[in-house]
């Protein structure tokens, strides 16, 4: 990349960071009480919430990791990226219940909903907070790691410098405006991602002439080889990678269909946005706007993976040594405008997801966990404490992310499954089934907490899970089974012992 | 369609499906697991979309059941064509895609949005009617007042 293009990318990217900061700064007036600061509760319309949801769901993994996986294994990962109807599914399954809980009592976090549903059960709130915190930190770290390394490499800066500039500014505006600024800046970043996606999808069609050319190249070319930086790099092609399941084992295709679709309803970035919506009657429209945004972003990732296959298969670029560089190889081939928008999309994806999980983890540490252990603070003090915690987590996570060797994709999927294992027992089952007892959900959360950590340790020690399936499927299933079985034999906060208001929510 | 009285049965079915899906993944019966995943999603939506314990029949037919059929059909077509063209180039393409992936694009992606997303917009009142929401809010006001009086 020439130095003039680098400067254009810098100006474009930092323009985006500046606009995000200004939005966050302007939003601080709205963050006047705990509900708006911590939850952005009942404040926004469907377009804003829709774009914000898409931006927070589509992380750097979607923009960088997915094209790399498509380049390596074909369509397996595309089952994840084409899950655009998952928002409507989530709203059908749990949307009105979550939003209705904001009418039961003051809601500013998922912990508050758990309090109302399970009669202030401290163990549930503490464990829910801890599992969500693990997932949130994994997500946050993966965004910081990917984005800082990318911009550091591009500009020839130390990744710590790039990380502290980009995520330092993000931490600052998140500190000022809390979740109100979070939702608004994410909506702006979501718009950037959609715009970049549209431009790159058009670029894909102009470059290749359509998907048929890619299928032909991949199906007819056995392999290509080139020497890159003194090392031989080989790309083997398989016609099977172009079928509906890709070249990975079927159990992975199964997992990458079920987990993203059903898991969307268990993601905090979707659940919290349900109660950020002003009018619950707008939720179907929210599903539509989120789906349209997601369709563009998802298809963008699909086309970038296909474009990389086409360019390498045709011999227009050498085989890509590190698959995570697939999208950059495509952008470099297309030219300056592609480079501008690809880097902007990655920055937007990283920042939106990072700000979402920064506020989530800060709220957990400053509000939900202290409350679970019996420490109640006055709202103003809570907000000030949260601001301090946001700064501390922001700094620590930048340092942690840049000293961690975990791959972007692994960290990203770790977050998704971990978050599901906590939210499914607590909310998806708890708000649709009156028979979910507090003992059952507590037991389910203990299971989730222990098995998430245990599974991570086992996996990092080389344990092979049966069928090659990702470990988090086992964890989610176990936490659901324990929740339901224990609920069947216990009584608290279920059926006739259920708060009448919660009963009305489940009936809604 | 009665959901309220059957909630425990549906939750037990959901739990069993999670277990079966996991076992299918372990044992390589991934396609069966995939199909069970679609049923799992349908059950979650049926539980969530019911109002006062009843799921409107029209809402069940479209979008829910239509979506279910479209996805199951899409997955069968995708599997059929992936088996047919295993280790070889497909002899034809649909919209430029491998026919197996075309089924995913048309049924899973576009079909999912045309059924669930648009269906929820079209039949929003069957999912949450104005009267139901207003009645819920009135009930909350009453219950919250009682709660306040007790405190």
Image (cartoon, coloured by chain):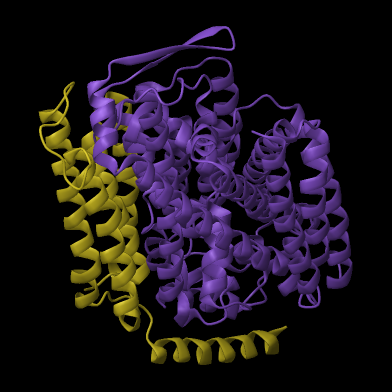
Q: Is residue A432 visible?
A: no
Instruction: Report the side of B14 relative to A281 (left or right).
Output: left
**Count of labels shown?**
0
Report if residue A72 is visible in the image.
Answer: yes
Q: Determine whether, in the image, residue B101 is placed left or right of residue A63.
A: left
Q: Which color was chain A given? A: purple
Instruction: Estimate the x, y position of residue B5 in percent, counting from the top left.
Output: 29, 69
Asked if residue B102 is positioned above or below residue A94 in the image, the reply reads: above
Q: Nearer the viewer, residue A1 or A53?
A: A1
A144 vs A220: above or below: below
Residue lying at 28% horizontally and 72% vertically, measured from the top left? B119
Left or right, B54 with respect to A365, comes to left
**Relative image position of residue B61 (x, y in whole percent):** 18, 70
Measured from the top left, where is residue B18 in percent x and y? 34, 43
| Above-or-below relation of A192 to A502 | above
| Quadrant of the rendering where the C terminus of chain A is positioned | bottom left
| Residue at position x 34%, y 55% in the image | B11
| Residue closest to the eye, A145 or A273 | A145
Drawn colour of chain B?
A: yellow
- In the picture, the quarter occupied by the N terminus of chain A is top right
Name the residue located 40 percent from the left edge and 33 percent from the top edge: A70
Image quarter of residue B130: bottom left
Q: Residue at x 89, y 67 (%)?
A: A381
**Percent coordinates x, y for residue A425 in the rendering:** 49, 52
Say which of B94 and B53 sits in front.
B94
């Amino acid at each position: 990349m020439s130095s003039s293009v680098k400067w254009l990318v810098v100006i474009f990217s930092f323009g985006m960071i500046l606009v995000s900061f200004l939005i966050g700064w302007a939003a601080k007036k709205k963050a006047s009480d705990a509900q708006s600061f911590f939850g952005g509760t009942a404040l926004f319309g469907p377009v804003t919430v829709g774009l914000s949801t898409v931006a927070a769901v589509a992380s750097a993994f979607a923009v960088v990791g997915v094209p790399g996986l498509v380049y390596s294994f074909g369509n397996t990962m595309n089952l994840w990226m084409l899950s655009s109807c998952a928002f409507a599914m989530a709203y059908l399954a749990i949307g009105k219940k979550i939003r209705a809980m904001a009418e039961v009592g003051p809601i500013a976090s998922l912990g508050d909903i758990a309090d109302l549903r399970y009669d202030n059960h401290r163990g549930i709130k503490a464990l829910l907070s801890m599992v969500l915190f693990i997932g949130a930190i994994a997500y946050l770290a993966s965004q910081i790691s990917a984005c800082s390394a990318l911009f550091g490499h591009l500009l020839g800066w130390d990744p710590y410098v790039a990380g502290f500039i980009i995520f330092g500014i993000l931490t600052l505006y998140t500190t000022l405006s809390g979740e109100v600024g979070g939702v608004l800046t994410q909506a702006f970043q979501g718009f950037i991602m959609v715009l970049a996606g549209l431009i790159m999808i058009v670029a894909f069609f102009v470059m290749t002439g359509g998907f048929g050319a890619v299928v032909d190249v991949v199906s007819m070319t056995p392999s290509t080889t080139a020497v890159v930086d003194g090392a031989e790099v080989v790309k083997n092609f398989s016609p099977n990678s172009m079928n509906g399941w890709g070249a990975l084992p079927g159990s992975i295709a199964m997992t990458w269909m079920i987990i993203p679709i059903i898991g969307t309803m268990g993601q905090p970035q979707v659940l919290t946005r349900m109660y950020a919506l002003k009018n619950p009657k707008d939720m179907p429209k929210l599903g539509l706007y989120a789906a349209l945004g997601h369709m563009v972003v998802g298809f963008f990732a699909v086309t970038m993976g296909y474009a990389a296959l086409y360019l390498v298969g045709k011999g227009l670029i050498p085989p890509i040594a590190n698959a995570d560089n697939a999208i950059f190889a495509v952008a470099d081939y297309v030219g300056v405008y592609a480079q501008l928008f690809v880097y902007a999309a990655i920055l937007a994806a990283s920042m939106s997801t990072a700000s979402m999980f920064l506020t989530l983890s800060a709220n957990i540490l400053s509000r939900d966990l202290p409350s679970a252990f019996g420490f109640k603070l006055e709202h103003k003090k809570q907000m000030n404490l949260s601001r301090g915690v946001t700064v501390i987590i922001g700094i620590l996570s930048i340092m942690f992310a840049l000293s961690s060797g975990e791959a972007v994709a692994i960290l990203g999927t770790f977050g998704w499954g971990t978050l599901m294992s906590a939210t499914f027992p607590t909310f998806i089952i708890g708000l649709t089934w009156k028979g979910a007892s507090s003992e059952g959900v507590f037991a389910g959360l203990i299971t989730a907490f222990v098995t998430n950590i245990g599974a991570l340790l086992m996996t990092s020690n080389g344990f092979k899970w049966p069928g090659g399936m990702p470990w988090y499927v086992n964890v989610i299933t176990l936490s659901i089974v324990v929740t339901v079985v224990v609920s069947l034999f216990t009584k608290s906060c279920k059926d006739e012992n259920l708060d009448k208001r919660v009963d009305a929510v489940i009936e809604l | 369609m009665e959901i309220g009285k059957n909630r425990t049965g549906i939750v037990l079915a959901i739990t069993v499906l999670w277990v079966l899906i996991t076992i299918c993944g372990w044992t390589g019966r991934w396609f069966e697991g995939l199909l069970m995943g679609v049923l799992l999603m349908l059950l979650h939506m049926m539980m969530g979309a019911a109002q006062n314990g009843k799921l409107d029949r029209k809402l069940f037919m479209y979008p829910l059941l239509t979506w279910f059929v479209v996805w199951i059909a899409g997955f069968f077509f995708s599997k059929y064509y992936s088996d047919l063209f295993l280790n070889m180039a497909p002899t034809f393409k649909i919209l430029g895609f491998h026919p197996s992936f075309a089924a995913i694009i048309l049924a899973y992606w576009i079909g999912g949005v045309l059924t669930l997303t648009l269906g929820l917009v079209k039949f929003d009142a069957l999912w949450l009617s104005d009267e139901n929401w207003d009645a819920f809010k009135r009930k909350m006001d009453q219950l919250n007042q009682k709660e306040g009086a007790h405190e």
